[in-house]
């Protein structure tokens, strides 16, 4: 008996979860990049180093995560619930990372 990739219980859900996680991480990086580009006088790498030396790296990452709300809303509108779970997982991982950054 052959199974279709879209049936519940096989690798398709894990792949969608991983895709959502990747979208969440990339949206956060893009948000951080846009914040540094538009609101500081630094380029991306020197802005990261400056924020880290000033102890504001966690705040920068948190501001960058705002774009995850956009990804969350779009994926919900498209009925991609498993991918939405991946975005939420990315936000949780980023929040834990921010505590230690």
Image (cartoon, helix red, strand yellow):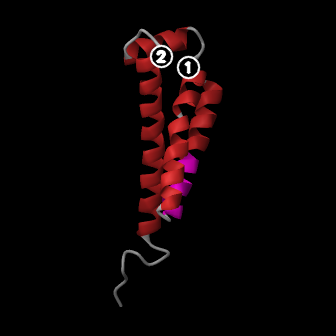
Upstream in sequence: badge 2 or badge 1: 2
Q: Secondary structure at mark 2?
A: helix
Q: Is residue 9 magenta?
A: no
Q: Main secondary structure of the magenta part?
A: helix
Horizontally, is 23 left or right of 53 in the view?
left
Q: Position of residue 34 (x, y in %)?
A: 43, 26
Residue furthest bottom as drawn: 1
Residue 83: within the magenta? yes
Please state, as top left, top right, bottom left or bottom right, where the C terminus lies in the image.
top right
The residue at 36%/80% (across/down) is: 4
Q: Quadrant of the N terminus?
A: bottom left
Q: 49 or 47: nearer the eye?
A: 47
Residue visible at 57% across and 42% down? Answer: 91
Percent position (x, y) of residue 15? 41, 60
Residue corresponding to mark 1: 57
Q: Which mark is residue 39?
A: 2
Magenta span of residues: 80-89
């Amino acid at each position: 008996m052959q199974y279709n990739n879209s049936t519940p219980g096989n690798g398709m859900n894990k792949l969608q979860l991983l895709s959502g996680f990747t979208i969440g991480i990339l949206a956060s990086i893009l948000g951080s990049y846009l914040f540094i580009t538009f609101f500081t006088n630094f380029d991306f790498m020197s802005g990261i180093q400056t924020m880290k030396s000033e102890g504001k790296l966690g705040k920068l990452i948190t501001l960058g995560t705002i774009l995850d709300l956009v990804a969350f809303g779009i994926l919900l509108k498209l009925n991609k619930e498993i991918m939405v779970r991946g975005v939420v997982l990315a936000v949780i991982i980023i929040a834990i990372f921010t505590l230690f950054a």
